[in-house]
Every structure is written in C-alpha cells, then in structure tokens.
Image: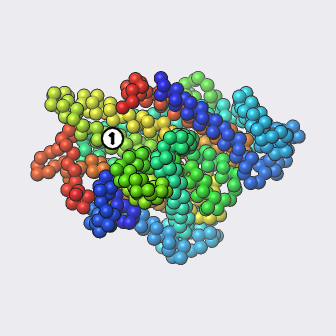
Amino acid sequence: MSALSSPLGSGPEAAALEVPDAVLGKRRSLVRSLPPKAKIGAAILAVFVLIAIIGPWVAPFDPSATTTGQALPLGPTSSHILGTTATGQDVFSQLLVGTRSTVVLGLLTGLIATVLSVVVGTTAGFLGGLADEGLSLFANVFLVLPALPLLVVILGYLPHSGQLPTAIVLSALGWPWGARVIRAQTLSLRRRDYVAAAREVGEPTWRIIVFELLPNQIGLIAASFVGTVLYAILTAVALAFVGVADLSTWSYGTMLYWAQNGNAVQLGAWWWYVPPGVCTALLGTSLVLLNFGLDEFGNPRLRAAGRELRIGRRVWRPADPTPVVRDEGAAR
Amino acid sequence: MRFILRRLAFYVVAALFAITVNFAIPRVMPGNAVQVMLAKFPTLDASSLRALQAEFGAHAHGSIISQYFSYLGQLAHGNLGLSVGQYPSTVTSILASTLPWTLILVGTATLLSFALGTLLGIVAAWRRGGWLDRAMPAFTFLQATPYFFLALIVIQLFALDWRIFPFGQGYALGLTPGFNWPFISSAISHSVLPALTIILTAIGGWMLQMRNVMLTTISEDYILVAQAKGLSPRRIMFTYGARNAILPNIAGFALSLGFVVAGALVMEIVFSYPGIGLTLYNAVTSNDYPLLQGIFLVISLTVLLASLLADVVYVIADPRVRSGVEY
C-alpha cells in the first residue's frame, strides 16, 4: 500500500509546487505518518492477500470432498477446526480456498473499473465541452441504475460464468463512482498554472494528462480503487449468494449460498455460515478503514480528534479552529 | 424550476437507457433464452411460444428498429409478457402483487436509517472525540457486512434463539391479506427483523458522510459568530450546522438508492419475504427470463422515480438551487 498512498500526503496543491523526487524521498516518513485507521486496514488486507496466495496449498482437506457416516453437519473439532457442512465438507478448507477467488475477483474488478474511471474521468474533465457533457451523462445514468438487478439479469444469461466475465460485468457497472470524483479533480487541476505552462511548451494533450495530471491524482485514484474493490467483493458475494455464479468453485459467496441452501441457520450450524460472513465483513472493513485513512490523510479535519480534543488540559470546542496535524510527516 | 426540469430530462434519458438495455440484453447475449425456456417448460403452447419469440427477438420479423418500437408499444400498455415459471400469469400481475411488499418495507427502512444515521452523524461531529465518534469503526464493520449475513445472524438470535419475532413470509399463515387488524399486526411483526437488518447496514454510511461534512461546517466562521452571540448549542447544532451540512447527504440519497434496493433484494431472499427480491430469486433459479427482465425494469424505474423525489427535496432544502443563481 505504501507506494499507492504515499504521494497523497503532499496533497494536490503541494505536489504541484514540488518536484516528484522530493515526494519520493519522503516516502518513509509519509508511510509512518499514515493514520492508524489506514495502517490497521492495510494490515488486515495484507493478511487476506496472504491467505489468498497460500490458502489453497495449506488447506488441510479437499474443500469439495464429502464424508459420510457421521452426524452431519459436524461442529468444530480438532481435525475440522471450523466443523463441516451437511455433506461433510471441511469449512476451514473451503474458507482457505475460497479466499483466493473472492480477493482475486475484487482486485481484478477494481483494476478494470479504475482504469475505466480514470480514462473517462480525466478525458471528460480535461476536454470539457460536449465530450464532458456526454461522458458525465453516461456516468450518471450508470450511477442511478440499480446495479445488482442488472447484474443478475446479465449474468443470468451467462450461466456458470467464470471469474473474468463476472469481473468485466462488475467493472462495467462499477466505474462511474470513480469517474465522477476524478473528473471533478481534473476540472480543478487543469486550470493550474503548471498545466498552462505545459501547454505553452507544446506538450501533446495525452502527455499532459498522463504525466502532468495523473501523478497529482494518485491519492484519489487509490481511494477510488479501494472503494471499487469493496463494491466488487460485496456485490460478488451477494450475487453468488443469489446463485448467479459458478457454484462449483469456492468463494465466500458460494459458501454462503450452500449454507443457505442446506438450511444452516435452521440447523443452528453457525460454524457453517458465520466464518465466510465474518471474513467478508473483515475484508470489507479493512478496505473501508483504508479509505478512511486515505481520506483523513488528505483532509486533516476528519481525523478523529480523540487526542486533539484535549491539548494541555484545554478542551477544544467545535467552533475552535481545527487543530491541523502535529505529526510532521503530513504537516509541512 | 430549471434544476428540476434538467433533472427530469436526465431521468427520462436514464429511463430510456434502462428500457433499451432491457430490450438489448436478450438479443446480444449468447445462447437462446427461448430454447432454454422450452427445454425447461415443454408444456408451453404454440401461441405463448410465439409471444416469447417476439419478446426475445428470436425469429422475429422486421428490423431491429421496428422490433424496438413494437417493444416500446407493448411497454406503454403495461404488457411485460408472460411468466414462464408461473405460467400463465402475466409478469405485470406478479409484479403488482409483490412490489407493494418491497416498497413499503424497504421505503420505510431506508427513510428510518437515513434519518437516524444523519442524526447520529450530527451528534458524532458535534461531540468530536466523544463515545459516538469513537464508535464509528463499529458502524463501519456493520456497513462492510453483507446484508444477508447480518440477516442470518439476526434470524439466529431473534427468531430462533430468543423467539422474539417471527421470520419467513410476510404474515402468519391462515390470515387473509386486507385491511384487518390481525393481518396488519402480523405483517408488521414479520417486517421488524428485515427492516432492522436494512437499517443496521445502511446507517453507517449516512452517519459517516454527515459527520464528515458537519465537521467541516462547524469550523466555519458563522458558527463561531453564532456561539459568540450566545445562541443555545442545540440551535447552533441543528439550525446553523446541520441545516447546512445535510445537503450532500440528501444529494447522496438519490445516488445510493440503487445500492439500498440491491441489499434489500438479497435480504428478502434470506427472510423469504414475499417481495420483489424473492421473486427475482425464483426467476433466476427457474430461468424465467421474461419475469427477470420485468423485475429489472420495474426496479430501475422505481429507483429513478425515488431519485427524482430526492432531487425535489434537495431543491426545497437548498435555496441556491431554488433561486437558480449559480454560486
């Protein structure tokens, strides 16, 4: 995460006045001065990414292998840490294996959607005029349309679709949020002097966009990426839960689908449906925390003022000027 | 007024887009939906088969343009075709019997969570660093929790372990839906748990946004002036702070409706609530494509209508938009 979030600390204004090298040189201190929320979020996310990488190799059982002859579903025991499903499949192994497809789908969708939103957002913001009107209208239409029913309809026609089609359809509906924010930022950036200077020097439009505008939006793009990954994971889990997914593979969503299908709640088999749900929620929380952190990094007013509230026995009332930043990493 | 008209034009475009998407999906998707339905429901008679083929563009005569206009014509008459899963009921009649359940439940729950979340956000920002402000991460966790998972937990606790509220279906068996007290009270007690899950998961978002905008607002000079004048804190908090900080929340309301509806659909499946989400689920599992598309269309148009209403509220709340002066 460090590489993604570090330039944000300088903020668009500051970055505009500085050579990138100075920002890069500050990377260490910037990372250290990340808000604690962002650190916690990044740490939880790192654990999930690690599980996604090694999960299928360390899973103690084949997640699809069934056993018979016992009272099923089996509660947690020493050999089945999280118990089994009604067909005797090991829940812990399903969780380890399922993390990969959930995380991969989220990151893949985040990647495609972010690229789309950056392209549309900067183009609309920079070109302005008719192109802006058209692209904004397009984005806004996508924003107000309810995504999940549309996804269900589209994926309903593509039965047993794999990861990639799902990711593509998810990104096709998930890009407008980022595009909106990036467009707004581009609008404000393109009036800056350094952009005018670049134009005077004769830089082509694409070069101005890629080398002058984009580096100053890295923080925003990172935040939009994180937000899209969150949307993708929650939506993909919901879709699988509804049964619109490849139900022969394991993910948090399909685990919940089979649990619901097997009446896990009515059987009181909490070990069957709680782990995938908690994992989804934890993964989601880590992303939300990360985004909070990125937000607070850019806007010091948002920081939880628990410490700032009493500085030397003085209690800050709401109307007092916001105490902005003490850690020198972000202060400057 | 100009603002409303512009928004109205936008929603007309969005509605047309939704209708066009609905028209295009069965025509551009690989595979033949009609064949799938035939395989699943071999009992369909010849006339309904023809109707299906016309609806899905298979073997239909005329250009794609004339197909589109005849589709629009059918739509204008409220004709969404026949459901193949619940043959021979029309899609329109199925929707008419399920939509009210969803509208009432989700509408009430959404408004409640919006009001509660906004109020909590105001308080959290006003007492920055207080216990409510510190509890924000807990609400974050709820927000990141999938609706239906929370629903499963709620069912386990409230319906199975403690038996406080019933779950499943919209009302107790043996009651006749209508305007009589046993039915209404049963419907209310059946809707408590579904509504609770919607409120719990949605409240965090409203709260966070309200808190963040409110924090910026209360550091404005006019708040300081109001305090210097000796106005009561409550008055400053609501009339000076919240009044000005609530605008992004109202604007966000229109945009978030799609997400709220999506969560509510899944929630209905968990609770077997007889609304449109459960119908969607049944349509998916039985490859009932006409019903599937009808549901998407109705949900889209409902969300667009609700967004338009939110825009009208925005105009009432923001005098700058009302007067049409650009700031």
**Residue A123: % across, % down:** 50, 50
Tell me which residue sits at (20%, 48%) in the image.
A323
| Quarter location, residue B213 | top left
| Quarter location, residue B20 | top right
Q: Chain of mark 1?
A: B
Q: Nearer the viewer, residue A237 or B303?
A: B303
Above or below: residue A202 compared with residue B173: below
Furthest-front residue in this view:
A201
Q: Nearer the viewer, residue B68 or B134?
A: B68
Residue B8 seen anywhere in this rendered image of the structure? yes
| Label 1 Cα neighbours within 10 Å, binned few <14 / some 14-19 / many ≥20 | many
Q: Nearer the viewer, residue B318 or B153?
A: B318
| Horizontal side, residue B204 vs residue A84: left or right | left
Mark 1 lies on a secondary structure that is helix
**Residue A306: % across, % down:** 23, 51
| Horizontal side, residue B291 vs residue B161: left or right | right
Q: Quadrant of the C terminus of chain A?
A: bottom left
**Residue B313: % across, % down:** 44, 28
| Horizontal side, residue B115 vs residue A114: left or right | left
**Residue B114: % across, % down:** 42, 36
Tell me which residue sits at (63%, 39%) in the image.
B18
| Quarter location, residue B221 | top left
Tell me which residue sits at (29%, 56%) in the image.
A17
- What amino acid type should be assigned to the residue bearing mark 1? Val
